[in-house]
Amino acid sequence: MTAVELELRTPYMKAEVIDGIGWMTFNNPERRNAMKMEMNEAIAEILASFHADDHVRVVVMQGAGDKAFVSGADISEFETHRSTPEGRQRFDAVAAAAGRAFASLDKPLIAKIRGFCMGGGLATALQADIRISADDGQFGIPAARLGLGYGFSGIHKLIGLIGPAMTNEVLMTARRFSAEEAFAMGLINRVVPAVDLDAAVVELASQIAANAPLTVKAAKAAVGEAVKDPERRDLDRIAVMVETCFNSEDYIEGRRAFMEKRQAEFKGR
């Protein structure tokens, strides 16, 4: 096992690459990984690095410790960063940059969830392509109990996953939902016992990392276009990506490996 750790400007985030998997960790366990503004700033830096690194085949994001994925925004910073129009503008700009980094990442993103996944933490988890939760996961958006406005983009994404009726219940009640409830409504892909979470996520990430990178990227891009409004879809881009797969060395390797009954060794080209 080889590990390469990224040097970051904040201690509240960690990032490393291990055997083709990029790990991004929200490292504020004393506050249940509540999201500080500097953590959002680091997200853009980390994801840009993973995006550009050909050794990274798949990305996993997780919270430090066993109490939370991300419990939400760090409310202790609201007075400093979100109490004035100027402060909110700066805060929103940092959050938007993190959002663009998530949107630009062309590699599969898995959210590994323990404990609290609330508010901004749930919004962060919704950026993932696949969400795996331990059975102690707790989900919710408490904006209605805090007097916060919740942006349209987050609501739109939530509706796409769980439908308008369940979105209404999540937002209007502001209550916590168990991992089992989250799975039943389609918010997460899978629930596993907490003791099995690490192994389950590594197994899933390793399966993805072993597949042909160009094919995986094309699949992720196609799903991304499919959930857009029809008039906004770039189907020509998808067609080019599919054709690139057929013209790749990996397509030749995949066929040979199948005929020779061996594991393919894909290079991403």
Image (tube, grey):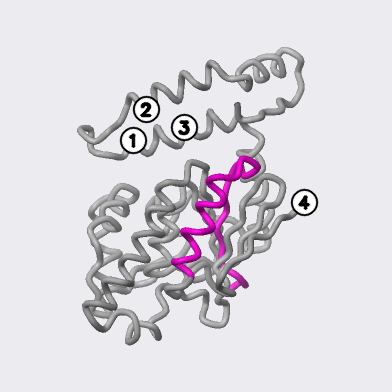
Q: Which residue is mark 2?
A: 237
* Mark 3 vs mark 4, CA separation in Å: 28 Å
* Residue on which the image places disc 3: 219
Can you identify the residue that label 1 sits on? Answer: 225
* 79 relative position to 56: left or right: left
Rendering quarter of residue 122: bottom left
Horizontal and vertical percent for residue 107?
52, 42
Closer mark to the observer between disc 3 and disc 4? 4
Sequence-wise, the earlier of marks 1 and 2 is: 1
Residue 42's spot in the image, x, y percent? 50, 65
Amino acid at the residue labelled 1: Glu
Dot 3 amino acid type: Ala
**Label 4–label 2 contact, CB within 8 A:** no
Q: Are marks 3 and 1 in contact (CB under 8 Å)?
A: no
Looking at the picture, how far across and down is residue 76, in whole percent?
A: 40, 86
The relative height of residue 153 versus residue 76 in the rendered view (above or below) is above
Type of amino acid under label 4: Thr
- Label 4, label 2: how many angstroms apart (C-alpha)? 35 Å
Return the disc, 3 or 4, that comes first in the chain's sequence: 4
- For mark 4, what is the residue? 2
Q: How far from the left and from the top, in percent, is residue 126?
A: 40, 55
Q: Are marks 1 and 2 in contact (CB under 8 Å)?
A: yes
Tag count: 4
